[in-house]
Image: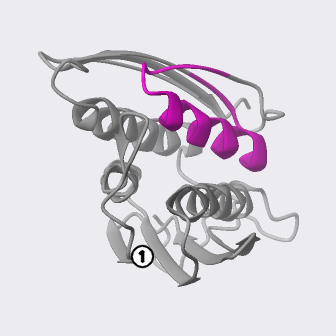
Amino acid sequence: MARTAQINRKTNETEITLSLNLDGTGQQELDTGVGFFDHMLTHLARHGLFDLQVKCTGDLHIDSHHTVEDVGICLGKALAQALGDKSGIRRYGSATLPMDETLVTVAVDLSGRPFVVWQAELANETLGIFHSSLAEEFWRAVAATALMNFHVVVHHGKNTHHLIEAIFKAAAIALRQATEFDPRRTGIPSTKGSL
């Protein structure tokens, strides 16, 4: 059964079409109008081996906040939809990823409960039109709508581009692990019987 999702969302701030294939090859078509964000979503797809298409028209004349947050909302919904009842998946995933001077750990639990721990102090910096604070906003939106635990720990690092990129890459690997099928598991990975 295909683990795919298609999300359409239209508000006064953004209009988004997003499609996701959890069992893809890392193909992506991304057009959010925010270059750095597209760069990060490329890493998410490539390292997670997710096929991801995102088209977003947002109120960039104000700033990129609504675009980034609303794409996060849509991605979280797509993850939840594509996972279905989560039968047979690993559920948990984590990755510690080095990138030059930076070292980051991301851990996820597709628990059905949203929770974010963000231990990442980022400089107050804008990369293109992407403010560094939007990295946390994006992942909080994803976690809230995917109903997952999402923990980020930055062990060390200085370059803001490297820090955010390492977070996205580590998240991609952690999500790939968590969404993969476990060949030894049957049913839903919870003693409660549902996630």
Q: Quadrant of the C terminus?
A: bottom left
Q: Residue 172, relative to residue 98: is it above or below?
A: above
81 or 172, which is in the foreground? 172
Left or right: residue 85 compared with residue 131: right
Residue displayed at 23% across by 33% down: 66
Q: Residue 19, relative to residue 102: is it above or below?
A: above
Tell me the magenta residue range. Answer: 29-53
Seen from this angle, which residue lies furthest right? Answer: 183
Q: Position of residue 88 (x, y in %)?
A: 71, 60
Residue displayed at 72% across by 55% down: 176
Q: Is residue 41 magenta?
A: yes
For label 1, the SS is loop
When asked about the image quadrant of residue 62, the answer is: top left
- Three-letter code for the amino acid on which mark 1 is drawn: Ala
Q: Position of residue 110 (x, y in %)?
A: 51, 64
The 10 Å Cα crowd at callout 1, few under 14, some 14 to 19, many 20 or more, is some
Q: Residue 116, relative to residue 144: is it above or below?
A: below
Residue 66 visible in image: yes
